[in-house]
Amino acid sequence: MEYFLVFFYSYLSGSIPFGLILTSAFTNKDIRKIGSGNIGATNVLRTGNKYLAAGTLLLDVAKGYVPIIITGQYFPELIELSCLSAFLGHLFPMWLKFKGGKGVATYLGIITALSIQLSLLFIVTWIIVTLIFRYSSVSSMFSALTVFVVNILRETAINANTSLELSVNFPNSKILFIFFVLIIFTHKKNILNLKNKTENKIKI
């Protein structure tokens, strides 16, 4: 029963299409018919409304953050199930025929709930890579990879020195690897665009 409950509220939270809801409510437009058709904050920005894009970003982060906090409080042994369920909810929402967003903002919310240190690492890496290459897709994929690599190095260091103690908690690297693979999967079109040199750059 606990497994189903955690899956249900985590998936339900992750599946809320805030990008679609906000653009429909404030612009009477269907975000799925604009730009890339994606329901995430980057595509919402293509409506020309920065406030809606910022709102979508924050709410997409929150829908990944909230269920993990709840699970950590009441069902800590099921934290990984909650993480994966919330993430899959955003990627494959049943309300939109399982066609969701790319999951980056929701991923950020999840890792923020797991480790503020890793979330800061993701944000800083994303900003630096964006300033250098100006591709949101490259920044997202590289930042997710960086988080995974840093975490697995941390695990290796602890395994090599059992007396090593850290004052902060870090998630299991297995779940971070799954997230990285899924983020690569959701960016497969962007990877093809990068290969063909047709990927849009961020204007800074």
Image (cartoon, rainbow, N blue to C red):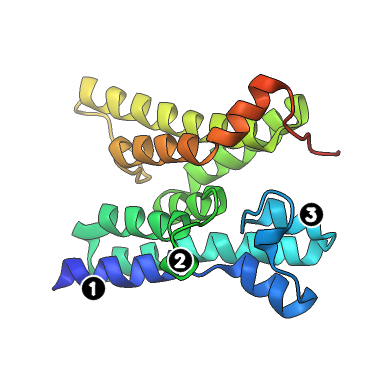
In this view, the residue in front, 73 or 165, is: 73
Residue 125, can we see it? no
- 46 or 153, nearer to the observer: 46
Query: How far from the left and from the top, in percent, is residue 185?
Result: 46, 37
Q: Quadrant of residue 73?
A: bottom left
Q: 190 or 109: which is nearer to us? A: 190
Image spot of residue 80 (x, y percent): 28, 52
Q: Badge 1: how crowded within 10 Å, few (<14), some, or many (20+)?
A: few
Residue placed under numbered mark 1 in the picture: 5
Dot 3 corresponds to which residue? 46
Q: Nearer the viewer, mark 2 or mark 1?
A: 2
Residue reaching furthest left?
A: 1
User: Which circle's residue, 2 or 1, is located before the other in the chain?
Assistant: 1
Residues at marks 2 and 3, CA–CA distance in whole angstroms: 22 Å
Query: What secondary structure is marked by label 2?
Result: loop
The quarter of the image holding the C terminus is: top right
Residue type, label 1: Leu
Q: Look at the numbered disc 3 and give the secondary structure of its residue.
A: helix
- Which numbered disc, 2 or 3, marks the residue that appears first in the sequence? 2
The residue pinned by badge 2 equals: 15
